[in-house]
Amino acid sequence: MAGTITIKNGYVFDPLNEINGEIMDVFIKDGKVVRELSAAELKNAKVIDASGMTVMPGGVDSHSHVAGAKVNAGRAMRPEDHYKANLQKTSLTHSGSGYTVPSVYKQGYDYSTMGYTTVFEAAIPPLEARHTHEEMHATPLLDMGGYLVLGNNFFMMHYLREGDMEKAAAYVAWMMKTHKAYGIKCVNPAGVENWSWGKNVSSLDEANIHFEITPREIIKGLTEINEHLGMPMPVHLHANNLGHPGCYAITKDSLKISDGVKTRQDMDVEWAETKIDPSRNRSVYLSHLMFNGFAGTTWADCESGVKYVADYINNKDHVVTDSGCTPFGEATVMTGDGPAIHDLYTLTGNKWSNTDVEMECGSGVLPFTYYKSNPVHSLQWAMGLECLLLINDPWKTIMTTDSPNGGPFTKYPEIMTWLMSEAFRKQTFSECHKWANDRSTLGGINRELSLYDLAILTRANPAKTIGMAHRKGSLGVGADGDVTVYNINPQQLDANNYETLLRTFRKAEYTVKGGEVVAVKGEIVSLPEKRTYYSEVHVEDEREKEMLTDVKEWFRYYTLGFANYPTPEKYLQNPTPIQVNVVR
Ligand SMILES: [Zn+2]
């Protein structure tokens, strides 16, 4: 029976069901977790003996750059990245190459062998949605979806400036359906539009050129629309002034804007059984806190400001953030925040690509290496870990590298080990520039995360945050049969023995996807089909009609015809729309 399997006797870590290392069997039938299997089903089921091992739901990455124009620009501009990491073809798998920006096949296999089964692309420019879907389609093994970049979109800024929230909401709904996108991404609000004129914005209340709208108005408007429509996830915010000394202040002030906004997640889906409420309860999802967390005034006096933002998040309940850790080594920075990448270009002189995606958004790409000997890079390493260790409640944090910005996702095992092992952190302190210790609080933190905490940071909370916990991030009855088995015996876990942890996290013993074993000890063994999720958001037909009159009128300035704008479903593997805001 395909997709039917028993994972026996493992130590199970399933935070959405408050299961913390109990020895249990996990049963999966036809791809879904079930309470038990009948005697006949048991006879035919595949069995994994997980005795003495750690069992978690499949990994969920809620912020990674894996598909679309800027990722491909990174691949194209970095031949040197492709000499460094190669993958031979096998009778089952394609060949692949690329270390920080792997080819589509390689990235699917690499995520899968680490135990991940679900990855969401963090930024889809509307006009590049087809390209993004083509690459997601070609990425094997991973269930995927992506967030639509709307913070500097012509129509959004126009409607928000006019205060026409009905049309703005109708536009968001139509854009999600049209581009088969899942949630709202907002990058450097008002600033990216100014970048079309070679400028940026410097405060939350500075109106941008022509549209005369401020970052505060955009964040506020998008948050209200998001909750009005009942979107699966909060507005995903990449705050202004990213990557500059002192930026923590504007980050903290940006988070305050959505304080008090009532969350409303209105999805017509079947929810897997969980012990704790799997629906989302945050009104803002801040991306890569590390890059938004610098204090100081210049690169000479800069220090970590993560503690100030962490203090705020510890005292409030409307924020969730991912870390954007920088684990040292090669990276390729890529973001819709064009001016931020330009500033890095002027700092480094590295090769640089910059694109304006007509009137909708923009992006920049640049190769970057984080050195242990560099004071700022060392500080960034410490700050990334502070993001996950200074925020007390793990349900407010998600582990990422903002791949490949802080480093490739294949470095997750290092980050997991730093989080679990103070000894490993001390070892790294001894190798890197003293700024890491002198200008952050990391050296004084002796918190070591447990396997349960890690399961929250890498499975349960990313799924809950983005509204996928109805089927991902848990092993509750009805959840997708996505499971990771690590060869770690929690009874014999020794955080000082970090080499073993590193080795174990790099290659999951088993990765199971939809009840099928897809990877064993670093080898891909099967390639089942995957799904692509998007939000089909419902608004009144009249509202949509009125809004479309405006859009069609302006469309003569686009370089393509209106009929060619939408991404047809055939671009998606197993398109799985999530019905949002359905009138009942
Ligand atoms: Zn990102």
Image (cartoon, grey):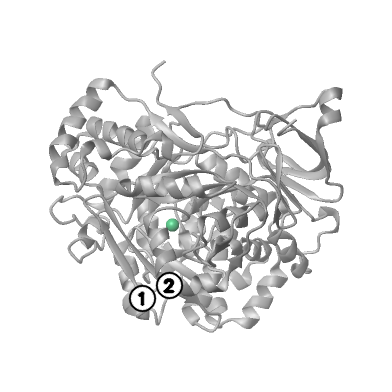
Question: Label 2: how many residues lie within 10 Å, few (<14), some (14-19) or many (20+)?
Answer: many
Residue 40, located in which quarter of the rendered image?
top right
Viewed as shown, does residue 246 lie left or right of 524?
left
Q: Given the image, on which type of amino acid does mark 1 rest?
A: Lys
Figure label count? 2
Residue 448 in percent (x, y) is at 69, 61
Question: Label 1: how many residues lie within 10 Å, few (<14), some (14-19) or many (20+)?
Answer: few
Whether residues under marks 2 and 1 lie with C-beta atoms below 8 angstroms apart, the answer is yes
What residue does disc 2 label?
Answer: 367
- Earlier in the chain: of badge 2 and badge 1, it is 1
For label 1, being within 8 Å of ligand 1 is answered no
Q: Is residue 217 above or below residue 406?
A: above
* Furthest residue in direction front, as rendered: 91
Q: Is residue 374 above or below residue 146?
A: below
Asked whether the viewer can see residue 253, the reply is: yes
Q: Given the image, on which type of amino acid does mark 2 rest?
A: Pro
Residue 350 in percent (x, y) is at 37, 78
Q: Quadrant of the N terminus?
A: top right
Q: Is residue 224 above or below residue 501?
A: above
Q: Secondary structure at mark 1?
A: loop
Compute the Cα span from label 2 to label 1.
Answer: 7 Å
Viewed as shown, does residue 26 lie left or right of 178?
right
Viewed as shown, does residue 429 lie left or right of 451?
left
The residue lying at 20 percent from left, 31 percent from top is 548
Please give the label number shown on residue 351.
1
